[in-house]
Amino acid sequence: MQMKNKLLTLFVIFVGLISINWHSPSVQAATTIQNPSKVLVVYDSLNERNHRQEDVQTLSRMLMSMGQQVTMMAMSDYHAGMISKGHYQAVITMINWPGMKFDNPAFDRDRHQFNGKKLHIGPLMTADEKQNFPGNWQEINQQSFILKGQNNRYEQQVDFQRQIQLLDKVTGNEQALSQLVAANGTNQTYPFGIINGQDAYLPFFSSKGATLLSSIQLIAQWLGVHGNYVPYVDVRDFTPLSSFTATKEFIKNLDSLERNLIITTTSTTQNTDTKTFKNYLKFLRTMTRDNRAVVYLNVPALNGVDSSNDDTLMNMLTQEISTLIENKIFPLGISAPTYWNFDKYYQLNALNFGDATLLYNQINNQDYHTQTSTAKAYQTMFFAIPHSALKNIKWNINGRYTDFTFPMPVTVDYHFPNSKAKAEKINREIKALPFAPENQYLYQFNTGISTQTQNLRGKDGVISLNGTPVSEIDFHQIKQQTAGIRKNQDQTGHLTTRRIVDKINNVLIVIIVVTLIVLFGMLAIGRKLYLRMFKNRNLKRTKGAKKK
């Protein structure tokens, strides 16, 4: 037995050695928020049948952009004690498919005993939840409403409500930031969203329109998140294959927009000597001239990533960043689908390159590598609102722009145009936005991207590389140095030193595996010899007893 325990101890040590040698440091750690508030979101269903999964994803993005460490969990996956074990500061119940009436008694009990912040979104409030809000609850069916924002800054007729629970009025210390006005001619008003101490309630949620704006305000107020951010405009998915004509038209109108843009670009590590790629680089330099736009690097399409090699994604992004830098293009953040922040592999090998991220919804084609329920809280995270989500909102404006601001960094999201006509349309839509132009990105934010050898930083109006302003750097020399390094790369893009480390790792693993096989073989042989000796001894005793 002692021999077996020793072998098991050796096995644990060997496994530890494997893990140490097998994984080498990859990306410099991004600046994440120290000790962020931990929020648990328990939703009843993604409700894919009614296409409501985007609402769940939007809520998670919203919370992340407010600096929260978010854990998302389906109600069916919740087990007793998870709230207390998770040490959460806030718990959100989201009813996304009320018709199914999903329930989890263990969650209901734990939520009732939880002493932190609690928010209920949607119908089907329990009796103990309603008790946290003084007043008379009303069950209203088959009704249309107009939602009016705080101080009547905006309004919109919202989706028809089949069933909704509302308080008739706000009393005592409760807060209501927006109002619902019945559209049946009675003009009856109800509070949309209520905060009473640590408890809050939203009667419904949406990823678009006035409902989204009012939800953002209430959730931020409930969490104690305060800020005054005017939205930037991001134009997403500029690639080397983007339309030449559309790009020229888009660039021609940049100056007339009078605002900083965030251009998210998907680069490549292949065919970088072609005229198409050189035009792509030229266009990016033109767009970022005089800080008219800042660049965020979008993560690559997964069909171009070898998921069997843990370093492929990291190496690909490292090479893309180096190529952009040597061509005087300076990405200051990472752009990715929301679900990438719910994957440990993507967090480590992609999102960690930047301390600023811009996340957007991607409902289909979600290809996880190592899925996790908890997202990281990065220092700066932009909440991208599709421009279509702001349509049909009536803004009450005195002058050219609204004074409405957001409590966290926000962008109005457009796709890069693929035709001259669409470029002209985007130009008109951006000019018509109700938000004042923002032109101070490099002064307002301190963001950047880091690899093992390059540290880009945009701060106080200056972009610097490894601490030196880029205006003082000889990029021709950097290009020559990078070209020399790439000569030592193999077909997979790994550096020669990395190949040597990999070979050493492989040799060590073979030695360790062979050693373990020999040790366990000896254990098996020793066990057989011991059993045989034990049987022979018992047999002799039995024969001796018979003779007596």
Image (cartoon, rainbow, N blue to C red):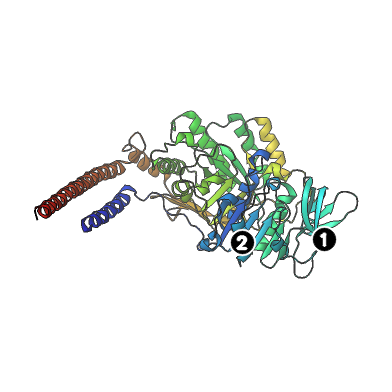
Front tag of 1 and 2:
2
Circle 2 residue: 109
- Name the side, left or right, on which 95 lies relative to 36: right
Residue 142 coordinates in the image, percent (x, y)? 82, 46
Please give the label number shown on residue 12: none
Q: Judge whether residue 88 can be spotted in this image.
A: yes
Amino acid type of the residue tagged 1 in the rendering = Asp
User: Which of marks 2 and 1 precedes in the sequence?
Assistant: 2
Residue 478 sits in which quadrant? top left
Residue furthest to the bottom? 172
Residue 223 lies, with reference to residue 237, above or below; the image says below
Mark 2 element type: helix
Residue 249 coordinates in the image, percent (x, y)? 64, 34
Q: Residue at x 29, y 54 (%)?
A: 12
Mark 1 element type: loop
**Quadrant location, the N terminus:** bottom left
Q: Give the crowd class for mark 1: few <14, some 14-19, many >=20 residues within 10 Å.
A: some
Q: Give the crowd class for mark 2: few <14, some 14-19, many >=20 residues within 10 Å.
A: few
Q: Residue at x 33, y 39 (%)?
A: 484
Residue closer to the observer: 179 or 488: 179
- Number of callouts in the render? 2
Residue furthest to the right? 185
Residue 513 lies, with reference to residue 136, above or below; the image says above
Residue 398 coordinates in the image, percent (x, y)? 81, 55
Residue 487 coordinates in the image, percent (x, y)? 32, 36
Circle 1 residue: 168
How far is disc 1 from disc 2 in space, using C-alphas?
A: 28 Å
Residue furthest to the front? 548
